[in-house]
Image (spheres, rainbow, N blue to C red):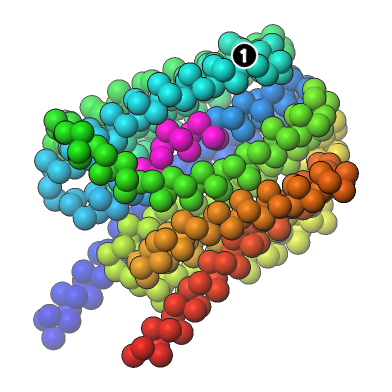
Amino acid sequence: MKGKERARGKIRMQEKRLFSNTFFLYLMTFSTQLFSFITVPYLARILGPSVYGKIGIAQAYMAYLQIILDFGFILSATQKVVECRNDSVQIGKIISAVFILKIMLCLVSSAVFGVIIQYNETLKTDASFYVLFMLATMINAAMPDFFYRGIEQMRMITVRTLIIKGGCAALTFLFIKSPKDLWLVPFFQLIGNFFAVIAMYFDLIHNHGIIPRKVGMGYIIAILKDSAPFFISRAASTVYQGLNTIILSTIYGTSPVVGYYTSADKIVSLSKSASSPIADSLYPYMLREKNYKLVRKMLSIFMPVILIGACIVFILADPFCILLFGNEYASSGMILRCLLPIIVIILPTYILCFPVMVPLGLSRQANFSNVVGLITQIAGLALLTLSKRLNVYSLCILTSVSEIMVFIFRLFTVIHHVRMSKRAE
């Protein structure tokens, strides 16, 4: 009896930690979105659709850069920290290796992005603006978020995000008064990220006793190889998601259409941000516990709410966009409707991936699922281009179809694996 009571107590403690991490991730996400929805309507009005579209273009390029700099470490290094969470020396080596690799990736990426700016007239006109965004992204990449995810202590990351986002929001209202102040948007992010990196490494050393350790090239290469499959997966996902803004900027130039899409995509990003804390907190927990009943329970609770919310957004898309972004953004409503399927399936898509598939031994299939989305997107783009039907609406519908294909692939892979396991038993 005592053994069963201890086991139950351990499970309750682990679930309490899971819900605590989920809470802090949601607090971080909610605060991020809150500050975003405070500043985005303000910036959209102050800058206007054409100038505000430049922020969307910059964020699209930075999404690629961020994936390259992360190189899958947020997943692979998190898993390694989970495996050796009581070994401070080993964790110090992991942090050192990841930091060295990110420095190398920064050097290569900055050279490539410099060439892109030089030969792209749209970017070249506002080169300093895009370079500031690049520097802010590179500084943000130096943060060892994977360590806090691995030890399931999200408080530090949450506090850091609250301070950065709150500070940037306050500075935005104080100093950005006209389109000429556009460069201040990435500059404020750069300053906030810089101080956050200093604070996080101070916390690592003084509160957790983690000191960066000397590592050899063989160890660094091993870390790189372990992260490569995760990088390919995340890169494939980002390619077909971030490519939309770049394609639209090529088709429409400085037209307000890019701004309409950017504003509608903000709402889709909100749904992703609302879903990612659940998947992120489940990932280290599921690596240890493999509690699939909890996954089913969470989906049964959240999916009805998501479906009802999606129906409301579909009906009220136009006034919703006007309310958030201003009268100039009424055209964003139809774009939002075309992207709405993504909002419906994003939570089960996230949960099925690494929190469920990796503990089942389906890591390779989980990584490949985003390649399925990329192939769907590229094939669709080719068909739309050849048929001369490529526009903002067809592109958004195609993106929704690509996300649905990723979800179907993950769902059927898990179902097939479970059936085969039962037959083997």
| Residue holding disc 1 | 118
Q: Is residue 87 above or below residue 306?
A: above
Q: Quadrant of residue 71?
A: top left
Residues in magenta, as a range: 63-73
Q: Is residue 119 above or below residue 77?
A: above
Front one among 103 and 309:
103
Count of labels in the image: 1
Label the magenta part by its dominant secondary structure. helix
Q: Quadrant of the C terminus?
A: bottom left
Percent x, y for residue 315? 83, 56
- Is 295 placed left or right of 398 in the picture? left
Kindly tell me whether residue 221 is visible in this rendering.
Answer: yes
Q: Residue furthest right?
A: 388
- Is 172 placed left or right of 79 in the picture? right
For the point 17% across and 78% down, the residue is 5
Percent x, y for residue 139? 40, 24
Q: Is residue 121 above or below residue 101?
A: above
- Is 108 placed left or right of 56 in the picture? left
Q: Secondary structure at mark 1?
A: helix
Q: Is residue 413 magenta?
A: no
Kindly tell me whether residue 27 is visible in this rendering.
Answer: no
Percent x, y for residue 187? 52, 15
For the point 34% across and 25% down, the residue is 103
Percent x, y for residue 116? 60, 21
For the point 46% across and 56% down, the residue is 367
Mark 1 neighbour density, 10 Å: few (under 14) some (14–19) many (20 or more): few
For the point 80% across and 25% down, the residue is 253
Q: Is residue 70 magenta?
A: yes
Front one among 59 and 8:
59
Q: Quadrant of the N terminus?
A: bottom left
Q: Amino acid at mark 1?
A: Gln
- Is 230 placed left or right of 200 in the picture? right
